[in-house]
Image: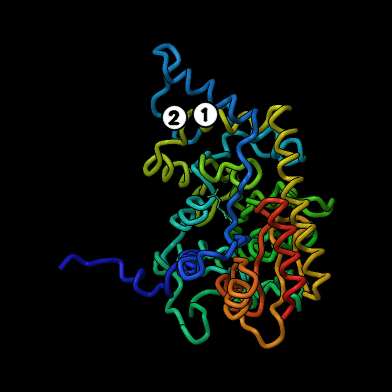
């Protein structure tokens, strides 16, 4: 018999969003008259901005002419894009990151799931709890998480760092020493963000114990408060302990186009090995580059027109976030996030679990959100709504919630 990777069999249930989708599909089939508002999954809804569309058209035309046709892209990304990223996302913020420390990819989901390949099978991971499920699941598939304890809703070999209202959504440094620390700021799902001094604490700790921080900044574009860092490299010493993951999905609406990048500084060395060289080797072996036309579209994001158009899109999502935050508060809910993030994180009403509130919201007001418990054990008793819907739907959803307060 062919041996299989038995770690897959240890994964709990199906992926959170497919469970939500199945429940919603079943409800919609049984109640075709219900006007369902989806504020659940973190996908964007606004179309790509004109500067990006223009760049896509021009790149498609180039691909149709022998003299400008492009075949395989460089594994690590075209230099025109890597240089624009280094300049705009890092040098402009005072971070000393060069273009050859940037690895262009097809998005932050694959990078955040694949990055664990650089580390030993026995590396111990620490995650914020609750957090984006991909970090734990990808390590579980690699056999690093031990066994899943269904009752407790947690893996036996993962260090969970509770990130809840009790600690102001700032995780404490772990008591046992991890090898890898996943941080996401602004965080999905809590919608909260770490301040510079809070992130600096983690950087100092990682350098002290020799851990590596995997910093996911997919929601960086939503930051508005001055003391929230946009990149971990704004912290002193981060280049010797941190890898940063970025995405074009939530700032520029590339969820369907696919583009992201990972920064691996050259100074980052563990066990005598350069993680930069290892990631270059891994990328070169397993990835044949993001499409030329998509990288051209990515470059358009950094033009003056692209920047202005994207700023407007983000402002529209942030307006929705403010409407949802104010609406929930007026309806008597305790709500967090939504300031530096498109996510709102609310406490479920007394005595209601995350999934019970999910069912109540769907059945009573036909609104879809995401149960907090799906993001980790400390997410129980919380619920996530997103600001990625339309203005009209955000307003209507709050109207319905206000009228139907449990
Ligand atoms: N990282 C976080 C924290 C996310 O919430 C998401 C998507 O929801 C991603 C990464 C995925 O980004 P991408 O679309 O670039 O794969």
Residue 29 coordinates in the image, percent (x, y): 46, 66
Q: Which quarter of the rendered picture does the N terminus lie within? A: bottom left
- Visible residue check, residue 274: yes
- At mark 1, the secondary structure is loop
| Viewer-proximal residue among 165 and 128 | 165
| Mark 1 neighbour density, 10 Å: few (under 14) some (14–19) many (20 or more) | some
Query: Is 153 situated above or below 263?
Result: below
Mark 2 crowd level (few <14, some 14–19, many ≥20, 10 Å Cα): some
Is residue 185 in sight in this rendering?
Answer: no
Instruction: Answer with the quarter of the image where residue 332 lies.
Output: bottom right
* Residue labelled with disc 1: 78
Q: Which residue is mark 2?
A: 73
Count all numbered tags in the image, as a single digit: 2
Q: Locate residue 146, reporting x and y percent.
A: 43, 76
Q: Residue furthest top?
A: 67
- Residue visible at 45% across and 15% down in the picture: 68
- Horizontal relation, residue 126 to residue 146: left or right: right
Q: Is residue 401 left or right of residue 12?
A: right
Q: Quadrant of residue 13?
A: bottom left
Residue 262 in picture, x, y percent from top left: 56, 45
Q: Toward the viewer: 29 or 202?
A: 29
> Is residue 337 shown above or below 255?
below
Which residue of the protein is positioned furthest toward the front in this rendering?
33
Relative to 267, is 91 on the left or the right? Answer: right
Asked if the residue at tag 2 contacts the one at tag 1, i.e. Cβ–Cβ closer than 8 Å, the answer is yes
Q: Secondary structure at mark 2?
A: loop
C-alpha span from label 1 to label 2: 7 Å
């Amino acid at each position: 018999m062919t041996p299989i990777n038995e770690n897959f069999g240890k994964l709990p249930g199906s992926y959170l969003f497919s469970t939500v989708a199945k429940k919603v599909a079943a409800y919609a089939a049984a109640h075709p008259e219900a006007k369902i508002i989806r504020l659940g999954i973190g996908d964007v809804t606004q179309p790509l901005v004109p500067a990006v569309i223009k760049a896509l058209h021009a790149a498609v035309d180039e691909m149709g002419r022998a003299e400008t046709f492009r075949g395989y892209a460089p594994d690590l990304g075209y230099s025109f894009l890597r240089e624009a990223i280094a300049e705009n996302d890092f040098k402009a913020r005072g971070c000393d990151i060069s273009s050859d420390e940037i690895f262009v990819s097809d998005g932050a989901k694959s990078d955040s799931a694949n990055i664990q390949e650089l580390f030993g099978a026995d590396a111990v991971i620490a995650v914020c709890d609750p957090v984006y499920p991909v970090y734990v699941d990808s390590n579980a598939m690699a056999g690093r998480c031990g066994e899943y304890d269904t009752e407790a809703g947690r893996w036996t070999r993962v260090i969970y760092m509770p990130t809840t209202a009790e600690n102001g959504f700032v995780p404490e440094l772990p008591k046992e020493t991890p090898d890898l620390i996943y941080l996401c700021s602004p965080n999905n799902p809590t919608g909260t963000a770490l301040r510079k001094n809070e992130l600096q604490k983690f950087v100092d700790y990682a350098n002290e114990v020799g851990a590596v921080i995997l910093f996911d900044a997919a929601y960086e574009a939503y930051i508005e408060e001055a003391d929230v860092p946009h990149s971990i490299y704004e912290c002193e010493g981060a280049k010797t302990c941190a890898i940063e993951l970025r995405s074009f999905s939530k700032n520029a609406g590339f969820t369907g186009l696919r583009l992201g990048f990972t920064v691996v500084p050259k100074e980052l060395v563990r066990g005598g090995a350069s993680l930069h060289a290892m990631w270059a080797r891994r990328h070169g072996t397993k990835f044949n580059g993001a499409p030329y036309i998509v990288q051209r579209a990515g470059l358009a994001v950094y033009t003056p027109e692209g920047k202005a158009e994207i700023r407007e899109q983000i402002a529209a999502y942030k307006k929705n976030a403010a409407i949802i935050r104010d609406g929930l508060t007026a309806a008597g809910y305790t709500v967090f996030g939504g300031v530096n993030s498109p996510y709102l994180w609310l406490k479920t009403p007394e005595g209601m679990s995350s999934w019970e509130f999910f069912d109540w919201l769907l059945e009573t007001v036909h609104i879809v959100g995401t149960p907090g418990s799906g993001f980790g054990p400390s997410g129980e008793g919380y619920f996530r709504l997103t600001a990625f819907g339309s203005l009209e739907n955000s307003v209507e959803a709050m109207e319905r919630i206000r009228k139907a307060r449990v």
